[in-house]
Amino acid sequence: MVDGQARIKPQGGAEALREYLLQGITQGILVPGQKLPTERALAERYKVPRSATRKILSGLETTGYITRAVGSGTFVADPALRNPVELPPINEAHVSPAQIMEARLLFEPGLAELAVTNATPADFARFEFCLERSEAARTIEEFDLWDRALHQAIAIATHNTLVIRFFDMIHTLRQQAEWGKLKQRSLTPERRQATRREHQDLVKAILDRDPDLARKTLAAHLRNVRANLLGY
C-alpha cells in the first residue's frame, strides 16, 4: 500500500490515476525514493488498461517525477532531477541496444561540452548527489538508476529544452527489457567501480570548465559502456 493512500481517495479512470500520483508526489505524501505499486496493481486499482497506466508512468518519468529500473520497480524521483519536458510514447520494439549506443555516442559528448558552458551551482549539486548515491548503491538496479540520473542531470545542465528533449527520447528507450538484461550481465563489481571513476572524471572536467576534456571523457566512457554491453 502506498503511504498516504487514505488521504487521496482513489477514483476510477486514467486521469484520476495521474492526478493521484502527481498530487501525492508534489504534496510530499509520496516521498523521494519511495517505491510505487506495480503497473498491474495501479491498473487494477484505477480500473484502467495496462497500456494507459504505462503511458501515464512514462509521462511522469520523462518529466522527472518518477524513475524506473528494470527488475527493481518504480520509485518517486528526487525533485532536483525534475524537468518540464513531456514526450509522446516511443515504440521501443524497433530500436536495438546497438542503435541506442550509436545514438548516445553521436549525441551525448556534445551535452557534456554544452554543460561546461551552461551548468550552474545547482547543476553541480545534482551531479554530486548522483555520484554519492551511486557510490552508496548496493544492487545493480540501484546503481543503474543513479547512473542514468547522472547522465540526465548533465543533459538538464545544458539548459537547452530541445537538447533535453532529444536526450529524453534516448533515455526512455533505455528502459526496454533487452537493455536491462545486458546491464545485468555486464555490470560486474569491477565494472561498476570503473564506471564510478569515469563519472567522477567527467564531473570534474565539467566543473573545471574544460569543454574538450568533458567531451572526450564522456565519449571514452560511452565506448567502455558499449564494449561491456555489446562486446565491441
Image: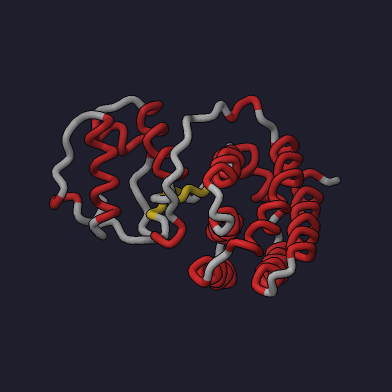
Q: Residue at x 16, y 35 (%)?
A: 11
Query: Is 83 situated above or below 179?
Result: below
Query: Is 54 situated above or below 191?
Result: above
Q: Residue at x 36, y 28 (%)?
A: 52
Q: Residue at x 28, y 56 (%)?
A: 30
Query: Is 52 situated above or below 63?
Result: above
Of 162 and 23, the residue lying toward us: 162
Of 169 and 161, the residue lying toward us: 161
Residue 196 in the image: state x and y as whole percent: 67, 68
- What is the tally of numbered marks visible in this picture? 0
Quadrant holding the C terminus: top right
Residue 173 in the image: state x and y as whole percent: 59, 38
Q: Is residue 103 visible?
A: yes
Residue 8 in the image: state x and y as whole percent: 16, 47
Left or right relative to 214: residue 44: left
For this orientation, the residue located farthest to the right is 232
Query: Is 177 situated above or below 159?
Result: above
Left or right relative to 180: residue 27: left
Residue 3 in the image: state x and y as whole percent: 23, 56
Task: State the scheme by which the image is colored.
Answer: secondary structure
Of 137 and 94, the residue lying toward us: 94
Left or right relative to 187: residue 164: left
Q: Is residue 133 visible?
A: no
Left or right relative to 59: residue 195: right
Q: Residue at x 73, y 42 (%)?
A: 101
